[in-house]
Amino acid sequence: MFNSYKKSILFHNPDYHCTFFYREELQKFGWKADIFVSDSYPRNLLYSEKQIISANKYTKNPKINYLIWFLINIPKYKYIFYYGRPPNFSSIFKKLRLSIEFDPFFIFLKLFRKKIIYLPSGCRDEFTKKEFSFFEDGRICGNCGFFERCDEDSNIKNLRLINKYADLVIGSGFTNPKLNQLRNIKWKSFDLKIFNSNIEIPDEFMLPKNGKFRILHSTSLQSRKVNGKNIKGSEYLIDAVTKLKSEGYNCELILVESVHTKNMRYIQAQADLIVDQLIYGHWGSTSLEGVALGKPVICYFNKEWKKNYIMNFSIGVWPFIEADTDSIYAVIKNLLDYPNLTLEYSKLSIEFATRYLNIESNAKEFVSYLELI
């Protein structure tokens, strides 16, 4: 019984498909691995509905339901893995006039000797707003539609709480925040039997064959573009492809919106080129999905962050085609003029995915980190 408890983990909200692949791989190792999905988690981002856990409807109040579920079920697990910010009960803290560094849930976990793992879900989970605003001379924050709602007090409180209570904070390898010490691990992972260059496309997702060079860009334009701001730089890509078409290039831009995350790979697999973020400074999920599918991928990388990543993971293969908002037209034009380049980058994508995104090897490494905390 004790040995089985030592190999038990609860994932609190999934990191897209990655968490599901980790769950399945850990279960192969004999672990009890479960995924809890909160009521607020966007259902269109939920990779699978199978074997997920949610709080029982004890009352009409979701927070009370969560509290009851938490107290009953948390004792079953040794490791509690939070993706993004834990449940917010700031209203309770205010009423009780508690310190900003006091969190009853984390204290409960610590009293029962639970190990807390934290995976930041974005920039505000790693940096204060003030710190991050200096990156790229302010271009990232300046193009972020969430910027006005990014609350500095909330950011700082969360960073302090994580710094105080978390046993392991997972880093992507790109950044070096001041308030939290990250353990850089190859977390982003794929089951390469599901994500690969030879997947079968269901008829319902089949795109019409027209002989055009397909450039795919996925973004929810409605939510990404706020007050004229777009963190992905989508409008620059649209302008570039429009210009190339006017010059006679046989290409088309496929803008994917409102496709469920579990089905995105079927659309991506039919693209000749995938374009991700042109402003942020490192990849989003689209880049890694494209690489796993063996596609050439365009993304912008901050020079210092890229240097950090290559050093942290001893990268020998860099498959990404780099471009920003100023160079995107020229980069795509070059690929159209020299089609063999896309084939070369496809090979590099497959090699990178095999070495650095493979769930079979990354899950073993993840377990070794858990055993150290």
Image (tube, helix red, strand yellow):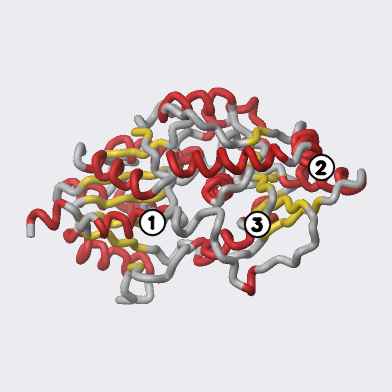
In the rendered structure, which amino acid carries the disc numbered 3? Ser
- How far apart are labels 3 and 1 at the CA level? 25 Å
Q: In whole angstroms, how far apart are the C-alphas of marks 3 and 2?
A: 19 Å
* Residue drawn at x 59%, y 66% as measured from the top left: 201
- At 17% from the left edge and 59% from the top edge, which residue is drawn? 75
Residue neighbourhood size for the residue with mark 1, other residues' Cα within 10 Å, grouped as few (<14), some (14–19), many (≥20): some
Q: Which residue is mark 3?
A: 220
Which numbered disc covers residue 240? 2
**Residue 211 lies in what quarter of the image?**
bottom right
Residue 207 shows in this picture: yes
Q: Position of residue 298 (x, y in %)?
A: 65, 40
Among the two numbered marks 1 and 2 on one chain, the one whose residue lies closer to the N terminus: 1
- 221 relative to 346, above or below: below
Frontmost residue, 200 versus 126: 200
Element at label 1: helix
Q: Marks 1 and 2, Cα distance to the nearest angstrom?
A: 36 Å
Foreground pick, 194 / 46? 194
Q: Amino acid at mark 2?
A: Ala
- How many residues crowd mark 3 within 10 Å: few (<14), some (14–19), many (20+)? few
Between circles 3 and 1, the one closer to the viewer is 1
Marking on residue 21: 1
- For residue 208, which numbered disc appears in the image? none
Whichever of callouts 3 and 1 sits on the residue coming sooner in the sequence is 1
